[in-house]
Amino acid sequence: MTAAMDIAITKATESKLKSTSFEKLVFGKDFTDHMLEADYENGEWKNVEINPFGPIQFMPSMAALHYGQAIFEGIKAYKNADGEAFIFRPYDNWKRFNISAQRMQMPEVPEEIFIEGMKQLVAVDEDWIPTKPDHSLYIRPVMFATDESLGVHASKKYKFLILLSPAGAYYDAPMKIYVEETYTRAAPGGVGFAKNAGNYGGSLLAAQKAKEQGYDQVLWTDAFEHKWLQEVGTMNVFFIINNVAITPSLEEGTILNGVTRDSAIKVLHEMGIHVEERKINIDELIDAYKAGTFTEIFGTGTAATISRVKELRYQDFSMYFDLEKYNIAKELKQRLTDIREGRAEDTYGWMLPV
Ligand SMILES: *Cc1c(COP(=O)(O)O)cnc(C)c1O
C-alpha cells in the first residue's frame, strides 16, 4: 500500500448542521456538508476530493442512466460514550463493493479511496454523527458509469462518490410478508449477489403489489420452483426452528452477502445458537410451524439491523409469530447494538476508528 492519498478538501462556506432537525430525521433525506468525489478515466483514479455537498452536472447521454452500470454500499458510523467516532466493518463493504464492480464490468475502487477517503470525509463531518441511542451516520458509497455515449459497452469513465446522511432510530415495525411466487429477484448466473442499482429497481413492483394487499415486503424465492427462500425485501433472512438459526446459503449467488448477516452468524455462535447456512424451502417452514418448532423469522441489514416478522403467508396459509417470544432476535439485536454503540467490547475488531 502506498502512502496515504492526498485528498484535496474544499470546505463548505456555511454549515447546514444547525438548520438540520435531528429530532425528526427521515432516512436518506438530509445530507452532511461534504461529499467525497473521485473520477476514473484512462485506466486510473484521479481528482479525489472532498467537496461541499451539492449538485453535479452530467450529459444526458451518461451511460449509467441508460444501461445501468451503477453500484452502491450502505455503512454506518457511530460515536461511543466518549464521543469517539467509529465506522462499522467498512472493509467488508469495500470488498463487497469491488465484487459488485467486477460483476458489473466496472473498475475496482482502491482502499486508499474507499476506506481512507471515507475516514477523512467522516472526520470532516464528524459533528454530524448523532449520539442518541439507535442513531447513526449512514454512509453511502456509490459508483456509476459516466461515458457520454449510447453505445452498449462497459463505460471507460466512472464517478465514485461517498455521501453521508444522519439517520435516526429506524422504527423496525414487525413485518407482514408473503412468499413471492410471481416475480423473481435473482437467478443463478445473474446479479443477485451484487449491490447494483438495478436489483432495487427490479424489486419495486413486487413490493408495491405487497403493499396493495396490506403486506410490507415479500419473501423472495428461487426463479424455478418459487419454493426455495432467498431474502426478505432487501434484507437477508433468518429462521429459528428448534432453537437453531437457519439462513439461506450464499453458493448460488442469488443473495446478497450481508455484513449484518455475517455479524449475526458470529454473534449467534457466541450466544450458543447453532447456525446452519443451507438451502431451505417453504415446505420445511410450514411443517415446522405446524409442529410448533418454528418460532422466529427476521431480516438483517444495515438500515434496520434486525426486523421481526409477525405474519408470513404462503398462498392461502398464514403463519403468525408471537413477538413476545422473539428471544433470539431480541438478544442478537441488543448485542449487535451494544458493539456498534461502544457499550460492549469489540472482540472482532469490527469498529474502525475514524
Ligand atoms: C444491502 C443488502 C442487504 C443487507 O446487507 P448488509 O451488508 O447487512 O447491509 C441484504 N440484501 C440485499 C438485497 C441488499 O441489497
Image (cartoon, grey):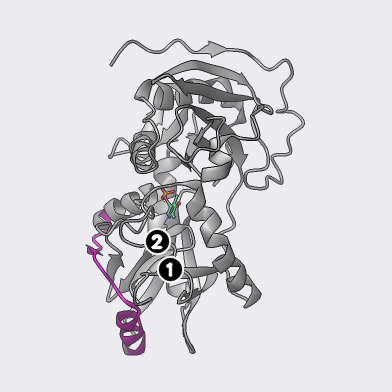
Q: Which residue is mark 1?
A: 220
Q: In the displayed image of the protein, which residue is found farthest to the front?
A: 151
Residue 48 vs residue 239, the one in the foreground = 48
Judge left or right: residue 108 versus residue 65: left
Return the disc, 1 or 2, that comes first in the chain's sequence: 2
Instruction: Using the numbered discs, state the Cα–Cα distance from disc 1 to disc 2 in whole angstroms.
Output: 9 Å
Picture quadrant of residue 126 = top right
Q: Amino acid at mark 1?
A: Trp
State the count of labels.
Answer: 2
Label 2 secondary element: loop
- The correct choice, above or below, for 83 with respect to 316 in the image is above
Query: Mark 1–mark 2 contact, CB under 8 Å?
Result: yes
Label 1 secondary element: strand
State the extent of the magenta-drawn residues as a range: 270-290
Picture quadrant of residue 115 = top left
If the image is split into quadrants, where does the C terminus sit? top left
The residue at the point 52 percent across, 61 percent down is: 203
Q: Residues within 10 Å of mark 2 (few under 14, many from 20)?
A: many
Q: Amino acid at mark 2?
A: Ala
Question: Is 285 colored magenta in this rendering?
Answer: yes
